[in-house]
Amino acid sequence: MDRKIKAFLIYAYSFIFLYMLNSLLMWFSLRANFPTTIVVIVEAVIMITGLFFSFRAIIGKYYGIKDDKKVAKAWLIHFIPFVITSYLLLFFVFSLVKIPSLAIFLYLNLDVVVLFFTFKFAVEKFIERNYE
């Protein structure tokens, strides 16, 4: 299997794990009556740091790159379009699909597709071009 696909699959699994962790955190916080704004901020910090460190570890393992400046630049080039597209996709899917469980299912699957294309773009433009 291609190392780019292996790296993406591990990255996608870490994204899904962080998404499930944040869902559990939201569920527990709603049960405990924590302020929703604080929980959303904590979830954002968990998702951002989790995805960055998993990206850094994956690029280090599969590409042998230890230059944090290049990895951080590649991650930002991946993450910023991913977040913008993800939010647009969220509003688009939930405005078209009126069944909540189907909308969540479609959103998460389309979000992984967006994750793949932004990951692939960042790896091809900043990792493979500069280090092979």
Image (tube, grey):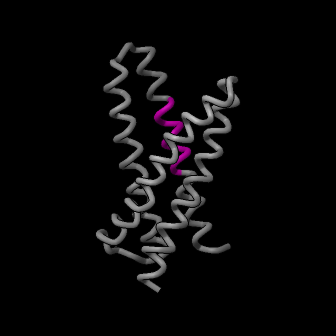
Where is residue 16? Give x, y as percent: 56, 45
Give whichever of 57, 47 is nearer the camera. 47
Residue at coordinates 68% horizontally, 29% vertically from top-left?
97
Residue at coordinates 60% horizontally, 66% vertically from top-left?
6
Q: How many marks?
A: 0
View extreme (left): residue: 69
Q: Main secondary structure of the magenta part?
A: helix
Q: Is residue 82 left or right of residue 38?
A: right
What range of the chain is rendered magenta? 14-23
Which of the 4 image quarters holds residue 78? Answer: bottom left
Where is residue 25? Give x, y as percent: 44, 29
Which of the 4 image quarters holds residue 91? Answer: top right
Where is residue 43? Give x, y as percent: 39, 35
Position of residue 104 relative to residue 31, above or below, is below
Residue at coordinates 60% horizontally, 50% vertically from top-left?
112
Residue at coordinates 38% horizontally, 57% vertically from top-left?
53
Position of residue 63 relative to residue 47, above or below, is below
Say whether residue 119 is magenta. no
Quadrant of the frame with the N terminus: bottom right
Give whichever of 115, 92 is nearer the camera. 92
Position of residue 122 relative to residue 44, above or below, is below
Which of the 4 image quarters holds residue 65? Answer: bottom left
View extreme (bottom): residue: 132
